[in-house]
Amino acid sequence: MNLTLYVWRQSGPAAAGRLEEYRAKDITADMSFLEMLDVVNEELVRSGREPIAFDHDCREGICGMCSQVINGVPHGSQEKTTVCQLHMRHFHDGDTIYIEPWRAKAFPVIKDLIVDRSSLDRIMQSGGYVSVHTGGVPDGNAVLIPKADADTAMDAAECIGCGACVAACPNGSAMLFVAAKVAHLATLPQGRVEAARRVCVMTEEMLKEGFGNCSNHYECQAACPKGIKVKFIARLNREFIRAQLKGGKDT
C-alpha cells in the first residue's frame, strides 16, 4: 500500500515545529507502524534528507517508549495497543496519516516525535517504591495475600509508564499513572507501611512537574495501551485523604 504521512518535525525544544508531508511506498500489511517509519527513514537517508526522529526500544509493547499520537489518538485507534504493536493491516491504501508527539507541558519535545518523559521517572523516584533491607529472598508464601488483592495489584502494575494517559487528557493530567503506581503498592501488605508518605510525596511531585488535574474525562482509560481503569484514581484519592487524616507525608 502507499500512504501519505504528515509528520511533526521539530529540531529542538526551543525550535518552531511544523507538519511535513512524506510518502510511504510499498508498505505491507504485516509491517508494524514503526517498521513503516523505518522504511520511510531509509528512503529519506538515501535521498540525503534527515530521517524522522522517534522513540522506541523493545518493540514488544512492554517499554512504553513508542509514544506517538496517530490521527489525533495516542498510540493510534486500536484499543490496548502500543504504536510498536499497531500493524499496517489496520490502514488502507491511499490513507492519509497524521503523526505527532505527545502534547503536554510536562513532556517537552526533544526532537520530532521524541518527548522528554523524565517527569514520570521523577514521580517514581519520589516515592514509587518499597524501602526494604536487602538480603535473602523470603519464601513466596511467607506473606499470604488474598487473591482479590493480588489481582488488583497486578492490574495496576500493568502500567508501563508510556504517558498516553497524559497525552489524551485535556488537562495533561498524570493521575492515572500515579494512581496505578500508588494502588499497586497500597494494595499489598509490603506497601502499606509507607502508603501515607508515598501518596503524599508522589502527588506533590506530580503537581511540581506541571501536570494538570483530573476532571473525569475518562480519555486516559480509553488511551491506555494496558487498559488501566480509572477506578485506581478513586483509590488514589482515598489513599490521599487517609494520609492527610493521619498527618500527611510525615507519618
Image (tube, rainbow, N blue to C red):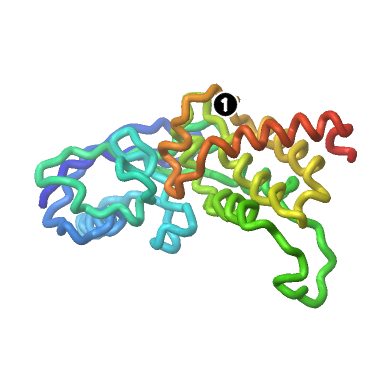
The three-letter code of the residue at mark 1 reads Cys
Front one among 168 and 10 = 168
Front one among 165 and 242 = 242
- Residue projecting furthest to the bottom: 136
Location of residue 79 by image quarter: top left
Percent coordinates x, y for residue 231 in the rendering: 56, 36
Left or right, residue 139 beside residue 14: right
Q: Does residue 33 appear anywhere in the picture?
A: yes
- Which quadrant of the rendered structure holds the C terminus? top right
Vertical order, 126 against 31 (above or below):
above
Front one among 149 and 129 = 149
Q: Residues within 10 Å of mark 1 (few under 14, many from 20)?
A: some
Mark 1: secondary structure = loop
Residue at point 59% right, 39% down? Answer: 232
Location of residue 245 by image quarter: top right
Total labels: the figure holds 1
Front one among 2 and 229 = 229
- Residue projecting furthest to the top: 215
Left or right, residue 205 beside residue 165: right
Vertical order, 229 against 47 (above or below):
above
Percent coordinates x, y for residue 243 in the rendering: 81, 35
Q: Does residue 45 appear anywhere in the picture?
A: no
Q: Which residue is mark 1?
A: 214
Residue at point 28% right, 36% down? Answer: 71
Left or right, residue 25 beside residue 116: left
Residue at point 63% right, 48% down? Answer: 121
Left or right, residue 124 beside residue 53: right
Location of residue 75 by image quarter: top left
Residue at point 62% right, 30% down? Answer: 210
